[in-house]
Amino acid sequence: MPDIPPQLPNNLPEDSPRQPNGETPDVNAKTRNLTCKDCGANLVYAPGTTVLKCNYCGAENEIAEETETVIQEEDFYTALKEVSTKADMQTLQTVQCDGCGARTTLKPNVVSDECAFCGTPLVTSSPETVEVFQPKSLLPFNIDQKNASNLFKEWVSSLWFAPNDLKKRAELTEKLKGMYIPYWTFDSQTDSRYHGMRGDYYYTTESYTDSDGNHQTRQVRHTRWSPVSGRIDHFFDDTLVLASHSLARNYVDKLEPWDLEKLTGYDERYLSGFQTETYQVDLKNGFDIAKDKMQTQIRNLVSRDIGGDEQRIENVQTDYNDITFKHILLPLWISAYRYQDKVYRFLVNARTGEVQGERPYSVIKIALAVIAVLAIIALVFFFTSKKRRAVGFDEIENLAYTDSYFHLFQNTFQSISIKLETMSQFIMQIDILNLF
């Protein structure tokens, strides 16, 4: 009679790793040492330090590295071939957001929360067990919530025509959530063969007759094209790929650069007190994205290699060799803000303090600003017309030959500029707009 495999938890793939006795790993085993040595309460990582702090008794517990960690690169093809064994996988309990699909872990003992990416309430009573590649390194939080909140407020205050309730949102510091975001980094030695055309400028002299009937000569530029081919070898180190669909890639890319040279070995103690998103872009698709980023740089290298004054690249064929990768976690402070049924996200790089985000506009403020500008222009025309009638046509004609007429309009436009600035500041601060 064939052996019957032990029953696996719900949502756990059949090829999940099992312990020698056939049981699945204890998903909480790695967090048992995250308790205060003085009072037993849960500890949280203090950003910018190497300690875990107790929010109840204030005790600090040093994060002592057991051994010196070496950040290792994993072989890409080996990982794809041996994915069925899940040797480097970890079992996590996560909650998936019904709004945006983000899958995140939660802080210990949390019974209710909202999604950091879109603000949707999370159903924490029904966590799912998933299998993912275990991160091997991370960058710990360097900026705490207070400093991140101040950076966020400064950014919001700098926005023109922002709704007033957006500024109120900036005061709600508890809405700013610390989140570790999954990334892949890829290394690869590339060998690229290309074909294209090189354009070199040359000049000829031609004669022409100008508008006055005079014979003139001029230099005319031409381009001489010649076929070229060549080969480019280049090594890519730590090409960074966001492994999440929860954040707009164009905003996240603007948070770079990251100080990847300061990566530390994966240690769950650095995660204590923060949420962690699991990756949505798998290893294979992650490298496809990395190749697109590499190709952009390769084409720049090809253009440089072709030389000349202009270049045309007809085709490039690239071989990728010695591919290695790292799965890492990078820290962000995130605030998700809903405005008129649309979600806007604000991001703070928790290492450098760089702020990026989406922003709504107040239609009321923009409309009032337009009305104010039109009113000022109408007043300017009214007073200049009145002055023109007062001095008479002959005197205006004489003013055209003096600096006084020039200064009249110069002062008028300066007045418009000053009034516009004053009016915009007034519109930004007007109390009645708190209703919108």
Image (cartoon, rainbow, N blue to C red):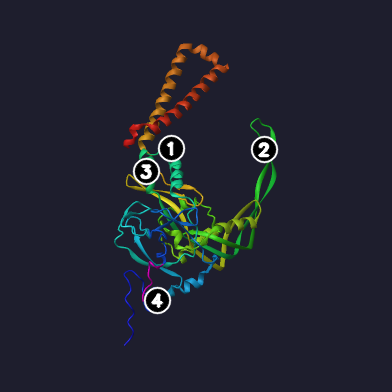
Q: CA distance from mark 3 to mark 4?
A: 47 Å
- Neighbour class for label 3 at 10 Å: few (<14), some, many (≥20)? some
**Residue name at image x 66 percent, y 53 percent:** 308
| SS of the residue under disc 4 | loop
Amino acid marked by disc 2: Tyr
Mark 4, residue position: 19
Upstream in the sequence, badge 3 or badge 1? 1
Q: CA distance from mark 3 to mark 1?
A: 16 Å
Examine the residues drawn in magenta and state their main secondary structure: loop
Q: Which mark is residue 169?
A: 3
Q: Nearer the viewer, mark 2 or mark 3?
A: 3
Locate the N terminus and report the quarter of the image it occupies.
Answer: bottom left
> Does residue 371 sit above or below 85 in this rendering?
above
Q: CA distance from mark 2 to mark 1?
A: 54 Å
Number of numbered markers: 4
Q: Which residues are magenta?
A: 23-29
Of 210 and 370, which appears nearest the observer? 370
Are dots 2 and 1 in contact, CB under 8 Å? Answer: no
In the rendered image, residue 322, in percent from the top left (x then y), is placed at: 57, 69
Of 333 and 60, which appears nearest the observer? 60
Of 5 and 147, which appears nearest the observer? 147
Amino acid marked by disc 4: Gln
> Does residue 88 sit above or below 154 in this rendering?
below
Mark 2, residue position: 208
Q: Which mark is residue 160?
A: 1
| SS of the residue under disc 2 | strand
Q: Nearer the viewer, mark 3 or mark 4?
A: 4
Upstream in the sequence, badge 1 or badge 4? 4
> Does residue 268 sit above or below 353 in this rendering?
below
Locate the C terminus and report the quarter of the image it occupies.
Answer: top left
- The picture quadrant where one finds residue 231 is bottom right
